[in-house]
Image (cartoon, grey):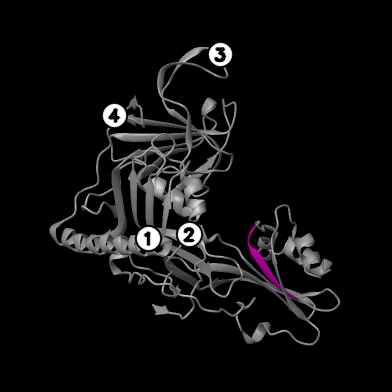
């Protein structure tokens, strides 16, 4: 890996430390092998990033000019090109018919597009990142980003999707709870995706809807990831280490690799990876709990409710709660679109009322914990969008929010020694960070 000399200016009190540069990499090691940034204030003037990488084939010629535009909510591709000074029906027709170019129609608000447009309004070059940065950041290895590039060659267009390098940096933040987790992380300039990961890491110990107290404190080291030479801002990626003080109790976690797989451990060396996720959605609220007697909202009769309902907007990603194998994926009476997974013999889980099922799922397909298996919907007997989630042990329904779940196996001696050394460094780093924070206020 190579460090660049690019630095981000830190503008808020809670965002005191940024990374020592951005690391361009497709594979990033867990925390034990990452050089954490020194605690220091760094300010450096930055040149404006290039709209395109400086490649010979995209240098403008004649009266053509580059434009970069941020996609607004409700934008269509035609409206976006028009706002950039273009008027090119041939380009729009090509995009609508070409298998690769059609991805330009799937523009998403908040991202940026770049184009080379000549004085007549013709589009000569067009570039758009097709993948979400959060989706590109795997827990164990960062995947390269993908960018759609469309070029005019004579009277024709050529579309291709190319890999692009990603810049990764390490940042540290501290936040104090005043009302909610998201209000605190927003104030501290902590990305929402990082806040969701924190809630996921401590989800087995802290109910982030009910257990938070005013004055609770959070300290976190996390990665950000951005497309190289892009005008888009960075997105939050992996949480490397975090401390959370909740009602006087300290919870901590760090990312550590064993047997080729990164997972979260407490600083004391206890694995935080449960055999099952308590919540198959990201930080959602429970709308209807497990009950042996409940008035059914559709049939208006009293029935047992042998699962948990998670209210969430249609399209919210649904995750496999544990490693397993697909037993069923399809439509099933009142469940609507449903996925049933089997896990290590005794356990099975069910995910119902989905709006869609991941297309690669079929009976026998293997899935890993956290894999996206579908999306929240309201198919079947449902009065609104939600996920109905069930768990069975030896064929018997259990309450997935209360049942005791098996723990991950403990660390071996060599890994425990390595983790303890890394944890000591983290404690020291967090303590130094507190000292700098106090000095700043003084």
Q: Residues within 10 Å of mark 4 (few under 14, many from 20)?
A: few
Q: Residues within 10 Å of mark 1 (few under 14, many from 20)?
A: few
The residue that disc 3 covers is 300
User: In the rendered image, is residue 282 in sight?
Assistant: no
Compare marks 2 and 3 and give the one earlier in the sequence.
2
What residue do we see at 35% from left, 63% from top? Answer: 433
Q: Residues within 10 Å of mark 2 (few under 14, many from 20)?
A: many
The residue that disc 4 covers is 394
Label 3's element? Answer: loop
Closer to viewer: mark 2 or mark 1: 1
What residue do we see at 65% from left, 57% from top? Answer: 108
The residue that disc 1 covers is 438
First to last magenta residue range: 110-116
The vertical placement of 381 against 213, above or below, is: above
Q: CA distance from mark 3 to mark 1?
A: 59 Å
Closer to viewer: mark 3 or mark 1: 1
Q: CA distance from mark 4 to mark 2?
A: 40 Å
In terms of secondary structure, what is the magenta stretch mainly? strand
Front one among 19 and 436: 436
Quarter of the rendering occupied by the C terminus: bottom left
Closer to viewer: mark 1 or mark 4: 1
């Amino acid at each position: 890996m190579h460090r660049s000399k690019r630095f981000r200016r830190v503008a808020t009190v809670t965002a005191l430390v940024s990374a020592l540069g951005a690391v361009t990499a497709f594979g990033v090691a867990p925390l034990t092998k990452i050089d954490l940034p020194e605690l220091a204030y760094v300010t450096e003037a930055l040149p404006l990033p290039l709209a395109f990488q400086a490649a010979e084939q995209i240098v403008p010629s004649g009266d053509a000019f580059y434009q970069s535009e941020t996609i607004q909510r409700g934008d269509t591709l035609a409206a976006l090109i028009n706002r950039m000074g273009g008027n090119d029906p041939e380009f729009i027709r090509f995009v609508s018919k070409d298998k690769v170019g059609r991805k330009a129609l799937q523009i998403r608000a908040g991202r940026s597009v770049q184009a080379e447009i000549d004085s007549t309004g013709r589009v000569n070059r067009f570039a758009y990142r097709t993948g979400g940065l959060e989706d590109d950041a795997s827990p164990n290895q960062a995947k390269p980003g993908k960018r759609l590039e469309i070029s005019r060659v004579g009277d024709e267009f050529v579309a291709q999707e190319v890999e692009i390098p990603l810049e990764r940096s390490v940042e540290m933040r501290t936040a104090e709870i005043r009302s909610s987790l998201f209000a605190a992380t927003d104030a501290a300039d902590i990305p929402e995706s990082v806040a969701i990961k924190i809630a996921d890491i401590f989800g087995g110990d802290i109910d982030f809807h009910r257990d938070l107290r005013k004055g609770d404190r959070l300290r976190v080291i996390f990665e950000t990831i951005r497309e190289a030479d892009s005008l888009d801002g960075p997105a939050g990626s992996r949480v490397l280490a975090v401390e959370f003080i909740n009602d006087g109790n300290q919870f901590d976690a760090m990312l550590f690799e064993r047997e080729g797989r990164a997972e979260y451990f407490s600083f004391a060396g206890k694995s935080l990876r449960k055999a099952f996720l308590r919540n198959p959605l990201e930080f959602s609220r429970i709308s209807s709990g497990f009950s042996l007697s409940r008035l059914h909202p559709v049939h208006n009769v009293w029935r047992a409710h042998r699962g948990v309902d998670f209210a969430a907007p249609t399209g919210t990603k649904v995750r496999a709660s544990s490693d397993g194998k697909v037993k069923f994926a399809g439509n099933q009476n009142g469940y609507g679109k449903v996925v049933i997974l089997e896990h290590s013999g005794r356990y099975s889980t069910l995910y119902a009322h989905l709006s869609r099922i991941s297309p690669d799922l079929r009976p026998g397909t293997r899935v890993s914990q956290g894999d996206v298996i579908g999306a929240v919907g309201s198919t079947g007997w449902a009065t609104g969008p939600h996920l109905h989630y069930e768990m069975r042990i030896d064929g018997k329904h259990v309450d997935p929010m209360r049942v005791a779940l098996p723990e991950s196996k403990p660390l071996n001696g060599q890994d425990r020694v390595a983790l303890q050394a890394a944890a000591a460094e983290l404690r020291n780093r967090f303590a130094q960070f507190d000292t700098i924070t106090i000095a700043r206020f003084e």
